[in-house]
Amino acid sequence: MLEPRKDRAHNFLWLSVGLGACVMLSHGVSFIAKVVFRASLDPESYGIFAFFANAFPAFLLVAHLYLEFPIVSKVSENPTDRQMYERTKAELSSTAIMTSGLVGVFFFFWTGATTGYWYLSAFTAMVLMVSAICNVLLAFSRGQDRLGPTGIAWLLGGVARLAFLLCFVWGILFPRTLASACVAFTLPWVFWLIAVVHYEGLPRPAMPSLSFIRPYYRDAFLAFLTGLALQLPPFASILIIMEAYGFVELGDFDIALISYSLFSVIVAGAAYVVLAKARRMPAFTLYAGSLLKKLGPVLVVFSILIITTSSYLEPLGLAVLAKVGLPNTVYWPVVTLLVFAVPVRILLELIVPYFQGHGVFKPVGVIAMATVLGSLPILFIVIVNWSLVGAAIGIGLVNLVMLLALGLFGLSDERRNARATGIKILHDVSDGQMDQPS
C-alpha cells in the first residue's frame, strides 16, 4: 500500500534532514580540520596533505566502483528475498575486497612516487581499502530502505574525526606534523567498520560467480563513470595546479574548494533518499520541473547576492582569512565557486541519483563522462591563464555542460518512452477491436 502523498513528503524531508545532518557532521569536521591544518603546517606541507586528501576520495571511488548504486537499485526491487540478499552480499563483498586491494597497491606506489612520503602512502592505502569495503556493505541496508546504518556510519566517522582533530590541536597523542594531519584526517574512515559489523555483520566469503556478478559490475562501472565525472573537475584542477604552480598553490586551492564541497554535503542527505526512493517518484519532467521551481529562484538570488556584495566585503573577507591564518589568494576563487560552480553542482547532486535510482546507468554514465572529458581542455586553458580563479571558472563550466547534457537526455528519453507507450496502447486497442465478434 502506497503512503499518502503528504506522509511521503514528510518522511522524505526527515530522512533527508537526518542523513544530511550526519553527513554534514562528518564532512563539516573535515572542512574545519583543513583550516586548522593549513594554519598549523607550513604551506608546502599543507599542499602535500591536500594532495593526499584529494587523491583519497578519487581512488576510493575507483576502489568500490560505485558498486553501491546497482546494489541499492537491485535489492530495492525485491527487498524481502533473503536468499538472494545473502548470496549477493557474499559474492559482491568478496570481489570488493579483491578490487580494493588492487587499487590500494596502485595508490601506494603513485602517491609515494609523487610526494616521496612512502609511509603516509602505505597508511592511507590501508585506510582506503577498509573504506571501500564498508561503502559496499552499507549499500545493502539502503537497498532495503534501512538508512539508519549509513547515518550511524557517518555519525561515528564525524565524532571520531572531531576527536582526532582535538588531539591534533592540543598536541595529544601526536605532534602537529604532516604525518599526524594525514592520520587525523583519514583514520576516522575506519570507524565505518564499527557500523558495518554492528548492523550487517562480517561478510561471508564466497567464490564469485562471473555470470552472477557481471550485471552488478556492468551497472557499477557505468555508475562509476557518472561519479568519476562529478569528481574529475576538482581533482583534475588539483593535478593541473600541482604541475603548473606547485604544492603551495595546490594547498591554497584546496582551501577554496571547501566552499564548493560544503554545499555538495548539504544536499547529500537528500541525494541518498532520492537514490533509494527514485522508483516511487514521478516522471523526470515533473521531478526536474519541481526541482527547478523550488530551487531555481533560491540559487539565482544566492548568486546575485554574492556577486553584488563580494567587492564591498573583500576587505572584511581578507581580514578574516588573515585572522585564521589562511592566504588571501583564496578569496576570489571562493567567490567564483559560490557564484557559478556551487549552484550547478547542487542541481547535479539531485538529478544524477534520480537516474541511478531508476537503474539508468549506461546512458547517464556515458553522457556524463563524455561531456567532462570533452570539457577538460577548457579547464586546462583557464587554469594556465587565470590560475586559481580560472580553476573555479573551469569547474563551473564543466559541470554546466554535464547538467545540460543530462537534462536533454532525460527529456528525450521520456518522450521516447511516451511514444512507445502510446504505440503499444493503440496496438492493444486495435487487437481488441479485431477480436470482437461481428
Image (spheres, helix red, strand yellow):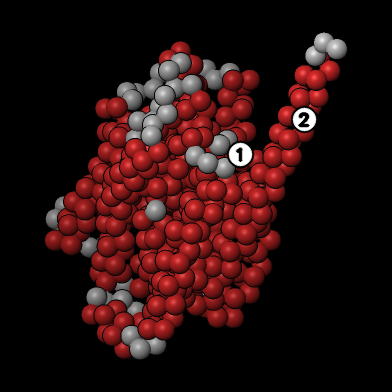
Q: Do the residues labelled 2 and 1 touch (CB within 8 Å)?
A: no
Name the residue at 27% across, 61% down.
Answer: 33
Residue 245 is situated, as x and y percent measured from the top left of the image, at 51, 75
Residue 5 is situated, as x and y percent measured from the top left of the image, at 40, 38
- The C terminus - image quarter: top right
Name the residue at 31% across, 82% down.
Answer: 317
Q: Which residue does the numbered mark 1 point to in the structure image?
A: 360
Disc 2 secondary structure class: helix
Residue 60's place in the image compared with 247, above or below, is: above
The residue closer to the viewer here, 375 or 47, is 375
- The N terminus - image quarter: top left
Q: Which residue does the numbered mark 2 point to in the structure image?
A: 426
Disc 1 secondary structure class: loop
- Image quadrant of residue 416? top right
The residue closer to the viewer here, 136 or 106, is 136
Of tags 2 and 1, which is closer to the observer?
A: 2
Residue 107 is situated, as x and y percent measured from the top left of the image, at 49, 48
Residue 75 is situated, as x and y percent measured from the top left of the image, at 48, 26
Estimate the spatial distance between the alpha carbons at disc 2 and disc 1, rounded to whole Å: 27 Å
Residue 398 bears which disc, if any? Answer: none
In the image, 38: left or right of 418? Answer: left
Name the residue at 59% across, 49% down.
Answer: 285
Q: Which amino acid does label 2 sit on?
A: Leu
Q: In the rendered image, is residue 138 in sight? A: no
